[in-house]
Amino acid sequence: MAEREGVVEADNTEAIISRIEHKTRKIESLLKQSKPVEALKTALEGSPPKTKDERCKSANWIVVHRAMMAIKDVDGLFSLLDPEYYDILMKYLYRGLATGDRPTCDQCLRIHEKLTERAGLGCILRSLADTVNTV
Amino acid sequence: MVNTQRLYLMCIRNTLDAAMCLQNFPCQEVERHNKPEVELKTSSELLLNPVLICRNEAEKCLIETSINSLRISIKVKQADELENILTKKFLRFLSMRAEAFQVLRRKPVQGYDISFLITNYHCEDMQKHKLIDFIVQFMEDIDKEISELKLSVNTRGRLVATEFLKQFM
């Protein structure tokens, strides 16, 4: 039983990593067309929440990071982004703030302020309290 | 540069606002004991995700919450050796007098310069937004204090050296 679950996990990991690579190509093309908001949306959706595998999380983080750094207009971002993405974006923002790299932190702080204004403190609290779906 | 500081403090303020949701919770393991769970970290169901907010490579702030307590650890910007020593001495001076501050922790968490421990009792006695104002104000003032100290040390050093070397002229 455990063995079968182990096999399913491995399959899922490979499937997720290939999905992430597929996403990366799509995002690169969107960024070339100067559509950073769509790129961020693509990066955020289909985030693998239930995997415990660090590689999947890191791979997805790299993709989201790429899309986030390409955003110049933060106000415009929120007029185009759907509210369902706010929670997952907040989790990635905190991951970005933990890196300590100056340009990443600058960008994350800018987005964080505007996101808190839009989504409120509940969004922050959900990202703190969710110990099951971490990024 | 001032703008990044404003954003950094705003982010910390918002996170603290959300994270400071403390209630009384007696210890689960030992009866009649009431301990700050964030310090012990014995039960994972009582802890929230710790959050690290970095402004750049030198300055960061770690916020750990639990059901009845909240720990904030701050690493202050230290540009050179002199600021390093001044920060250490000044913050040690404050930490030794932690009783007077009530929310200060006697020893900073490993890797940080100063730590605060806020429990549910503090939230009952004091207003939440005033506590947060205190912490953010503290962070702003620390930078100013350290630069003032550095300036006074340099001035004094220069005066002493001038006076001393006058005898050799």
Image (cartoon, coloured by chain):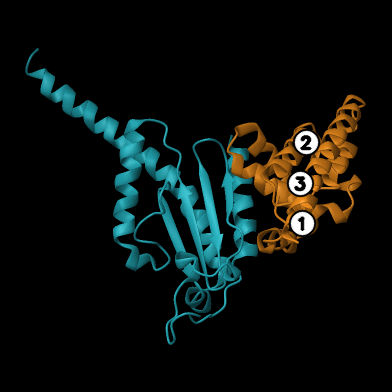
Chain coloured orange here? A
Instruction: Say whether residue A95 is visible.
Output: yes
Q: Which residue is drawn at 58% across and 47% down?
A: B53
Q: Where is residue B152 in the image (x, y as percent from the top left)?
A: 30, 36
Task: Classify the position of the C terminus of chain B by image quarter.
Answer: top left
Q: For the residue carrying disc 2, how many other residues have a C-alpha within 10 Å: few (<14), some (14-19), or many (20+)?
A: many
Badge 3 or badge 1: first in the primary sequence:
1
Badge 1 vs badge 2, beta-carbon distance below 8 Å: no
Residue A124: quadrant of the picture: bottom right
Pointer 1: what residue? A5
Pointer 2: what residue? A63
Q: Residue at x 93, y 26 (%)?
A: A33
Pointer 3: what residue? A10
Instruction: Say whether residue A76 is visible.
Output: no
Both marks 1 and 2 on one chain: yes
Q: For the residue carrying disc 1, how many other residues have a C-alpha within 10 Å: few (<14), some (14-19), or many (20+)?
A: few
Task: Classify the position of the N terminus of chain B by image quarter.
Answer: top right
